Image: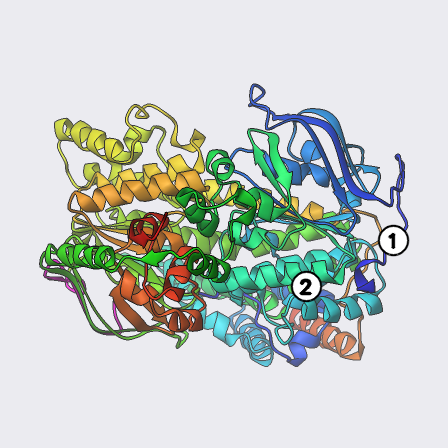
Amino acid sequence: MCAFQQRYPPKGAGIYVMNDEKAIVIRGLTFSYRGDEDVRAVKSLDFEVDRGEFVVIMGPSGAGKSTLANSLNGLIPRFLRGKYEGSVLVNGLDAAKHSVSRMADEIGLVFQDFEAQLFSTNVKLEVAFGPENFAVPREEIAERIGRVLKTVNLEGVEGRSPATLSGGQKQRLAIGSVLAMHPDIVCMDEPTTDLDPLGKMGVFAIAKELHEQGALTLLIIEHETEEALHADRLVVMKDGEIAAQGKPGDILRDVPFTDGAGIMPLQIPKYFFELKLCEREELPLLPKDGAEFFRRKGLVLEQSRYKWLIEGDRARERHYGKTIVKAEGVTHVYPDGNRAVDDVGLEIREREFVAILGHNGSGKTTLVKHFNGLLQPTSGKVTVCGKNTAEHSIYEIGKEIGYVFQNPDHQIFAETVFEEVAFSPKIRGCPEEELAVRVREALEAVDLAGYEKQDPFSLSKGERQRVAVASVLSARPGIIILDEPTTGLDYTEQRKMMELVRKLNESGQTVIMITHTMWVVAEYAHRVVVVKDGRVLLDGATRDVFAREPELEASHLRPPHIVSMSNLLGHTLLSVEEMKYCTGGVS
Amino acid sequence: MDMFLYIDKETPVHRLDPRTKLLLMLLSFVLALSFRNFAILSSVLVGVLLYGAAGGALSNLRRIRVVLLMIALFSMGIWSVATPSDSRFLIFSLDGLLYGVMVAIKTDLMIISGMIFLSTTKIEEIAGGLVKLKLPYRGAFAFSTAIRLVPMIVATSYTIIQAQKSRGLDLDSGSMLQRARKYVPLVIPTLVSVIRGTNVFSMALESKGFGYSDTRTNLLELRMKRNDWLTLGVALLVVAAAFFFNMDSV
């Protein structure tokens, strides 16, 4: 623990008022980005953090969370410029009046995009980069590398190139490279957004450990409500202001507030709150406590209603059409010998909504890329609408199956939304007069009608994601593949995106979705395929797969809280609504 | 997919100081650019290949063999047509062909030599070496970072090609002009992604104290050792000998 207390004497001119109590003191911070002067990203913000405190900051996109984070080490206003008022004192040092590299000695910042923040040849040199800049003696750097890699659980990969690590390892390395500078405050800006459940767990484990060591002040900006429970304080931001702060449990029990603030509510308190059985303070937070509370209150799960749900599932299955995607004994071996997909057989029928789960590197993306001919199997066969993908080009297969990539910025290029959405039908020879109809139809489907003349680059991430979906829909494929459609979106945007996908599916579209977000799977997908080490581990109706919690956990997948609680009560219910529907015994 | 050129191995070449390797590369450039003598050029090529083999860099050369071959064929084709000559077979001349072969060896020699340098030297060593040669650290870092960005851009553009192909972009048909226009959907997202990526990259860099002070520790200890001096001595002797035996053609 002494590792993170040890610091270097301050350097450079400026006010240096050591305040032992407060690590961070923000007074009246108002900031608007250059080029967007009318929008104040944060408004007269007052915020303090005690030394050694663990604070989680939540809030919808555009709430000002990243602006707050970037102002702590002076990136705002020195790197990201704009109109700045107020003061930010970090360890008594005015962040706006010192260089970012000077502030780096006080506070370490970890970014969401782990690819862009790693740049060294190997893990060891990556960790060394910070201390090297601060002219720490060579022997001590070597010592710090050992210590830091132990903390972030990366021992044994010292010589590996960061590019060869998994996403979770990369983000842990990014955290380690910041810890090596011995800052006594660390701020992480959405560190787990791009990670699979296993990677997320790794990062949270480190955060918890660092906090328990006690010396470090920790700020984490996060979307995962469940993880906020470990913090000393939860701060919820909205529209550039702090909407609420306090003990995580207290805030998360306030269901009307979390619903209104646009952050994901905790499912267990939400469920019990809506049953109106008890006072707010009594609301249980976690599945186990919830199940106990459920029994104590004499509640029961109504068999007849549960049977009705099951019957609904069966009826939906009977409604599926013929098989349209068929993989037979598909194996894919990359040139480096990695067997990413190993003898997979899979059939997907018309109008199904299939979620493909698995951790990073499980082979799920490789498998799905076979469905539209981006990859060809090393052995085995893939047929889409009766066409063998080996005998038809991507162009031809693409008429049947559309693929929305994870990052919309990897495909958006046109000057207007109309041009972007019209691109695919246009190159497929769609006549001018029909083009307008297709674009209108696609934009209406994603709820972006009226955006035709807008510049796609100026839209929000959620809107860009929807433009990407529209630009695939306009080619009118019968099947649509979505790769992580909700990553990087806030809760409201995620809901909106998924309601849209549900609507598409209900109107006859077959949906294949890769995702890490378990509540999305539980509430929207009809069928779940879990891929592990290139093989299909579990395949079945969502309800059946989510009933098998131990097997899911072995793949580092954890069902949402409400599902876990219902499993403890003997049945598998997939959402708060289903749970409420089946609950009996409410007096 | 591994896009990085550096091959992490423990070989005598890896152990050389980056300054030595940089100088060896420059000397091979000097030789390639100074001579038109087949015997000398091909022995230098053989020498460089042996040096590359000692550094375990041949696998990277295999990766670019198509490029090397294309350059050779292109050079032979162009020069055998373009060189003025009295004796021609159809439109090809033998003098031109020979000249083309020589230009091909010169060009490939320099590419191979550069590739071996990048395959056996970490970017931090390149930066460190340049600092030792009295270049300012910021400049040296910028140079080494540029090398690192290339594979990153290649990886991004690979994803973008897949995304656009999925939307029906067909890069293989149409006239030259039509094909060129088809690259717009690839180039713009690549540029946007690279600009966004480098923005985060520079923020991360500053947040790790880059440029905090003028004195900076380098974890990798760079020292010219006996082997470095020996290698450089031999290399200089070879260059001197080449110039000595080939005075007229310089």
Residue drawn at (83%, 48%) of the image: B213
Q: Which residue is mark 1?
A: A8
Q: Residue at x 52, y 47 (%)?
A: A223
Q: Looking at the picture, which amino acid does disc 2 mark?
A: Glu
Asked which secondary structure carries label 1, the reply is loop
Query: Which of these two is toward me, A100 or A227?
Result: A227
Q: Which residue is the site of mark 2?
A: A209
Q: Nearer the viewer, residue A438 or A373?
A: A438
Type of residue at label 1?
A: Tyr
Residue B127 visible to an observer of this rendering: no
Left or right: B131 with respect to A583?
A: right
Q: Crowding near pointer 2: few (<14 within 10 Å), some, many (20+)?
A: few
Task: Judge whether residue A413 can be spotted in this image.
Answer: yes
Relative to A226, A325 lies left or right: left
Q: Earlier in the sequence, mark 1 or mark 2?
A: 1
In magenta segment, residue A389 = yes
Chain letter of disc 1 in the image: A
- Which corner quadrant of the image does residue A140 belong to? bottom right
Of the two numbered discs 1 and 2 in the rendering, the one whose residue sits closer to the viewer? 2
Read off the magenta span: A376-391
Horizontal side of residue A134 vs A46, given as left or right: right
- The chain containing the residue under callout 2 comes to A
Counting from the top left corner in percent of width and height, residue A26 is at 74, 33
Spot occupied by residue A37 in the image (x, y as percentages of width and height):
58, 20
